[in-house]
Image (tube, rainbow, N blue to C red):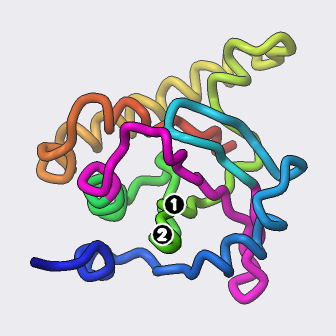
């Protein structure tokens, strides 16, 4: 039987220590919190060694996402390569914690811009975003069918659209 680390190291993204991600997010401080959902909190971080801003998803211990779902998520997202999909930079499983480090999206999540109180997207920009989303969905359904075949509908659904403008 293989360990979580063995399974994930074969997946491709970088393995981070808990300490490295804690330092990157100022120990997961509230000031760095970008949002909170059913699976946990997301924090803004910065990897000095890579000169790279990141978003760190810290999966809540009360989350129903177990080890199997975590490994599946890392494996699937690691295989996805599309300009309109947020990239997984790395992962961490230490101290009974499950963490995922993603490419940071400075423009935040798409839903904030579409449905937020201060939605300022003009229709030509919304159209461009729709074309980008359609392109990403086409990639997921046709080019990456094998990647997502093993994923549950919920795992694919929870993969939020980041706004890359």
Instruction: Please indicate whether residue 27 sits to the left or right of residue 157 in the image.
Output: right
Is disc 1 surrounded by few (<14), some (14 to 19) or many (20+) residues within 10 Å? Answer: many
User: Which residue is located at x 58 percent, y 28 percent?
Assistant: 128
Say if 118 sits above or below 35 in the image: above
Can residue 2 be seen at all in this image of the molecule?
Answer: yes
Q: Residue at x 66, y 47 (%)?
A: 42
Q: Is residue 80 visible?
A: no
| Pointers 2 and 1 in contact (C-beta within 8 Å) | yes
Q: Which residue is mark 1?
A: 100
Give how far across and how far down residue 71 sits, in percent: 29, 60
What x and y, as percent, mark residue 153? 24, 29
Residue 84, horizontal then vertical, whole percent: 49, 46
Disc 2 from disc 1: Cα separation: 4 Å
The residue labelled by disc 2 is: 91
* x then y, percent, for residue 72: 25, 55
Q: Relative to residue 30, is residue 18 depicted above or below?
A: below
* 153 w.r.t. 19: above or below: above
- Specify which label sits upstream in the sequence, 2 or 1: 2
The local crowd at label 2, few if under 14, some if 14 to 19, many if 20 or more residues have their Cα within 10 Å, is many
Tag 1 secondary structure:
strand
The quadrant holding residue 126 is: top right
Q: Quadrant of the N terminus?
A: bottom left
Bounds of the magenta span?
A: 44-70
Quadrant where the C terminus lies? Answer: top right
């Amino acid at each position: 039987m293989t360990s979580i680390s063995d399974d994930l190291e074969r997946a491709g993204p970088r393995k981070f220590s808990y300490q490295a991600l804690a330092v990157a997010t100022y120990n997961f401080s509230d000031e760095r919190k970008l949002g909170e959902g059913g699976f946990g909190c997301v924090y803004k971080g910065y990897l000095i060694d890579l000169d790279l801003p990141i978003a760190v998803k810290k999966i809540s211990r009360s989350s129903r996402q177990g080890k199997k779902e975590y490994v599946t998520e890392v494996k699937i997202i690691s295989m996805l390569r599309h300009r309109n999909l947020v990239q997984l930079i790395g992962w961490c499983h230490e101290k009974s914690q499950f963490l995922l480090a993603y490419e940071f999206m400075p423009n935040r999540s798409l839903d904030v811009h579409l449905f937020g109180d201060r939605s300022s997207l003009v229709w030509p920009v919304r159209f461009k975003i729709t074309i980008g989303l359609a392109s990403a969905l086409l990639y997921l359904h046709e080019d990456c069918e094998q990647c997502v075949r093993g994923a549950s509908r919920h795992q694919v659904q929870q993969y939020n659209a980041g706004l890359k403008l």
